[in-house]
Image: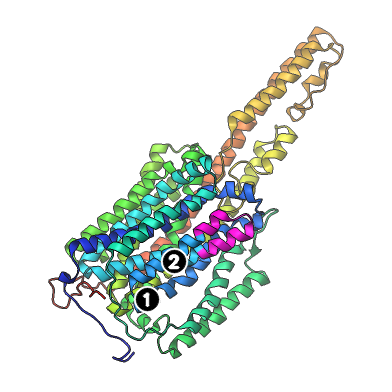
Amino acid sequence: MSSQQRSVVVADDTQLSKSQKIMTMVGTLLGMLLAALDQTIVSTAGPAIQRDLHIEPALYSWLTTSYLVASAVMTPVWGKLSDLFGRRRILVQGIGVFLLGSLACGLSQSTTQLIAARVVQGLGGAALFTTAFAVIADLFSPRERGRYTGLFGAVFGLSSVVGPLVGGLITDTLGWHWCFFVNLPVGAVALGVILTRMPPLKSEVTDRSLDIVGALVFALAIVPLLIALSLAKVELRPGDVGYLWSTPPILGLFAAAAVFGALFIVAERRARVPLMDLGMFANRAFAVGNLASLVVGMAFLGAIVFLPLFMVVVVGASATRAGLTTVPLTFGIVFGNIFAGQVSSRVGRYKFLIVGSLVVQIAAFAIMAFTLSPDVTTVGMAARMVLVGLGLGPSIPLFNLHISSAVEPRQIGAATSTATLARSLGSTMGIAIFGNLFGYTLVHNLEERMATATAGLPPALVAEWKGGPPGSPSSGDEGAMPQAGFDVAAAQAKIRAGFAARRAAATAAPAAAAAPAAAPAGDITSGRPGGAGADAARAEALRALDSAEQQALAAVSAVDHALKDSFTSATARVYFVGLFFALAGLLVSLRLPELALRGTSDPGARGAPALD
């Protein structure tokens, strides 16, 4: 790029007052909070949306997939646009598109309308995350950035606790449409702060040509990749949605992603102002930082997405309180974010924090993999989740700090968007891998243990439970939270009611017909009346019923244990495999070249940007 195409502006801290910096941070935080809250609020409303719009299982996952795909496609585009036209303009446009999508979601009356509106939301939401970290790099020197990136991570963590609670309350009181409408007043406040109080930071680039061809080819590469990862399955069972990894649809999508990915590289090398400056990857600090972000991102969501399910089915928390049970995890993530950011700013070093957090993450994953048991207590799980959170928390702010410090100021928007994309791709791949692993392990363990546990149960109940005990993979589509764990009390009450009816029939009937009352537990729901007979036959029938009832009640407990054992094994397997991803992340992070974090008083440190 020639000197005529760009103009780097270096200014003193005095150009932006403290109040201007604060209001800039407030506006950016509100924008990020808007997108973060929406993701968690909408997940809670999923079952209500599915019931109201009669969404088919094959389309249910697209409520999330459509948003993620659209967001991934636009992430580098918004990053580049923010470098070309300034952060404030892109932040305002991103919020505007997001609010338009939110309004359309709330007004949707069909599945097609809602999925299309979620695409619009994703297009706008990408700008909010991408711009947030670029703004920090604009406002503060490398030495100061850590504490503020930690705050952004803390806001995201807090939204994961507040979101499900708010989403449940709104869905129960106002209806699922308001889970989207609630974005409008929050977005209006964010826009008001940004437009009135956030200074228009001056763009450092004079050639504002946008690489449209590169953006289109990038979309053609990333869309089939993400769709393939979302639909690929290790095995398909009745009611499952997707395709086997080795089937033509999945292989075709991966092939298309590879072809267009290669074309994207060719297009970017020829572009005068490329969407993604591939020359940045020649910078070892940038390349290794993005690789580490991708690998660690693979372990991040896989470590937390199944915990609410485990707390409901195994620990016994109610589904409505499932969000609260992960507060210890959120505390660990938030504290890890803030602590790592503050320490890196104070000491001017960060690599030891990355390595240390990954060591903690490996230890936490090992504890989860080898000590998790069906009889774990809430307190025991809380301690484990705090440790997992402390291991996961520092990764987001510190990798962003490293990557933003590795490039020139004019490249910060593109660099932070690349880091966001790498982390998103890692999370998508992690969810695909861990989701398949969890489902495969759970189904096979459950089938084996249920066959033994249900030997003495009524055929009707066995068929009902095998069709999908609450929380099992067959009881809902991927990503749906179970409404409750296996209800032992309800099952036992049904058993007792059946036997009570049989006893009443045996007592009232003549003794000769009482003998059939001694039928095995598998026939307790038929309710056939007895016949004539002696008192001895009647007493024998009642004793047989007592024995069969105890057998059936014990079988119900065995089913509960089988379900909990299977969920525990599947969850532990996820963390066992996650160990290897965390270890890979550690090995890659050890190769990170640590960059000097200079303060505003250091020679050559970047100050605040100029104003338009």
Q: Would you say residue 124 is visible in this rendering?
A: yes
Instruction: State which quadrant residue 395 falls in.
Output: bottom left
Asked which secondary structure carries label 1, the reply is helix
Which residue is located at x 44 percent, y 75 percent? 77
Q: Position of residue 289 (x, y in %)?
A: 35, 71
Q: Amino acid at mark 2?
A: Ala
In the picture, which quadrant includes the N terminus? bottom left
Residue 408 in the image, given as x and y percentages of width and height: 28, 79
Above or below, comparing residue 190 to residue 422 in the picture: above
Range of the magenta residues? 102-120
Circle 2 is placed at which residue position? Answer: 126
Residue 592 appears in the rendering: no
Residue 502: name its quadrant: top right
Along the line of sight, the residue nearer the viewer: 380 or 551: 380
Name the mark nearer the viewer: 2 or 1.
2
Q: Residue at x 37, y 53 (%)?
A: 157
Disc on the earlier residue, 2 or 1: 2
Front-most of 233 and 70? 70
- Judge left or right: residue 210 versus residue 350: right
Q: Is residue 191 magenta?
A: no
